Image: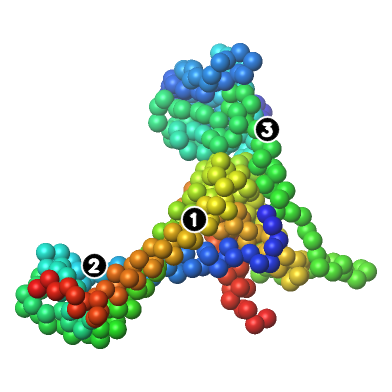
Amino acid sequence: MSTKKSNTASTNWFLQRVSGVGLVALLGFHFAVEHFIVGAAEVTAGNTVDRITHGLIEGDHVLGQITINLPAFLYQAIAVLLLGFSVYHGMYGVYNILMEQDSLKEYSKPIKYFFIVFSVALFVQGILIFLAFFEPFWAVYDPR
Amino acid sequence: MATTQQTQKTETPTEATTETVAFDVFRYIPEEDDEPHTETYEIETFEGMTVLDALIKIRDEQDPSLTVRHSCRMARCGSDAVYINGTQRLACNTQVSELNEPVQVEPLPRFDVIRDLVVEMNDFYEGMEAVEPWFQPDHEPETGEEYLQSSENRKNIDTVLDCIWCGACTSSCSPAGTDSDFPGPAAMAKAYRFYKDEREGEETRRRRLEMLQDSHGIYRCHTQFNCTEVCPKGISPTEAIMEMSRDSVKEKLRFWR
């Protein structure tokens, strides 16, 4: 064990805990909306756009004819946080499992950089998809 | 007279409590065997018989080549930890009557086997040494003074003081099995014992925490509580590790200091 003061292990461990708790809460919200309010059969691009861009859930869903209008920012923040937490929690978790294997320790640096680059790429990809819900991206595609 | 009666009671089991129990025992003598195998022994048990009693009986009456490490026979020395019916336990502290048949006895998993049920403990001892398990006070007391400890502080470390270095926890620990840099739960509990000791002083406490917060230290714990479940002394290394992990994060969050 080292006595390096620049050790980031405690920060990473803390963020893993925070992202884990965050995932439980956000996935709970996600399941409530997608499965118990809207219903899986009603998950369409149009409904998702309404919710992400206008905060609107409207129509004949699992709970019947409903209209829920919350601030769009709420759904946007949840989408971005869910993306960030899941990428961090998943990638750091897998990285740790690999780093526990004695046989992989000599490759620890390449593996670490691979996971950093891969995680950033995943996050950027997710953000690009998220941005596609808004104009002008949305203006070129109307599924309804 | 009383002594004679007691001796007769323990040495001569009553017929009503005697039954034959099968033991599947792991056998491996490197000089003779190409690979490990299991041998089945059937022995007559008596009331209160422990697995260690059974192994000694097998060795004395059926197979003198059977090797098992043991010493005090009263769960104090920690030398006879083995894998009994899929759980790490002390052989001297496990009643045969509580076990399903056949009783399977194997050496502690994740340790190298020296012979039969005896495993190599050097890595375990090195892990214990890595956490510097000795008293390191910041300051020497002035002449005539003692290192005083409050009873509250003593109570805090009471939980981990009973460790008998049997290795059961380390054998049950997933990360200790794959990460040789992780000293293991027993070492972490030992580190906690000194980390919480107020007599060492703040400077040593911080240095210990810095040493433990390596990525192969306290953060390697999966919080599975395997070590806690198998500890024959009721120690919870997991809780000790989690407390040190929380303290480590709190220290980091106090960035203004």
Task: Residue at 52% x, 29% y: name it.
Answer: B106
Look at mark 2 in the image and give the residue it sits on.
A31
Q: Amino acid at mark 2?
A: Phe
Q: Nearer the viewer, residue B186 or A57?
A: A57
User: With B227 as the anchor, is A132 left or right in this view?
Assistant: left
**Which of the chains bears the disc numbered 3?**
B
**Which of the chains bears the disc numbered 1?**
A
Residue that protrudes farthest toward the right in the picture: B143
User: Is residue A30 among what the camera can see?
Assistant: yes
Q: Nearer the viewer, residue B208 or B243?
A: B208
Specify few, some or many for label 1: CA neighbours under 10 Å numbering under 14, 14-19, or 20 or more: few
Q: Secondary structure at mark 2?
A: helix
Look at mark 3 in the image and give the residue it sits on.
B71
User: With A131 as the anchor, is A12 left or right in this view?
Assistant: right
Between disc 3 and disc 2, the foreground one is 2
**Do badges 2 and 1 share one subunit?**
yes
What is the C-alpha distance between the residues marked 3 and 2? 58 Å
Q: How is the image coloured?
A: rainbow
Look at mark 1 in the image and give the residue it sits on.
A114
Tag of residue B6: none
Between disc 2 and disc 1, the foreground one is 1
Instruction: Provide residue B17's location: percent of width, then percent of height.
Output: 44, 26
Q: Amino acid at mark 1?
A: Phe
Task: Residue at 61% x, 68% y: name it.
Answer: B248
Count of numbered tags: 3
Q: Secondary structure at mark 1?
A: helix
Task: Residue at 78% x, 58% y: name it.
Answer: B135
Tell me where residue A49 sits by quadrant.
Answer: bottom left
What is the C-alpha distance between the residues marked 2 and 1? 32 Å
Between disc 3 and disc 1, the foreground one is 1
Q: Amino acid at mark 3?
A: Ser
